[in-house]
Image (tube, rainbow, N blue to C red):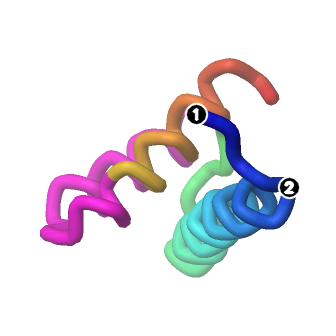
Amino acid sequence: MKFSEQEIKSVWDEVARLIGDSVMQLRHRGEELTVESLSRQLAQHQATCHDVEQRIMIAAAINMLKDGK
């Protein structure tokens, strides 16, 4: 299965947006900003999310953070 550059870009844009939202939430609460805290924040969001596509995007964001990319 091949994806176009535009399809890939939109996925990474959404992943970046999810990470950015988590950063803003952590900062707003005055919490330490680390890979672990971001991953935990995203996992909490994923646990409450009912949209399968959104859950997949959140999982991609968590994996990206943990892989250091």
42 relative position to 47: left or right: right
Residue linked to disc 2: 5
Helix, strand or loop for the magenta stretch, by majority: helix
- Mark 2 is surrounded, within 10 Å at the Cα level, by few (under 14), some (14 to 19) or many (20 or more) other residues, namely few
Q: Quadrant of the C terminus?
A: top right
Measured in 3D between alpha carbons, the distance from the residue under mark 2 to the one under mark 1, in whole angstroms, is 13 Å
Which is nearer the eye, 60 or 19?
A: 60
Residue at x 51%, y 38% (from the top left corner): 62
The quadrant holding residue 26 is bottom right
The answer to whether any part of residue 56 appears in the image is yes
**Place of residue 19 in the rendered image (x, y in percent of width and height, measured from the top left):** 63, 60
Residue at x 63%, y 58% (from the top left corner): 15
Residue linked to disc 1: 1
Residue at x 76%, y 23% (from the top left corner): 68
29 relative position to 6: left or right: left
Query: Furthest residue to the right?
Result: 5
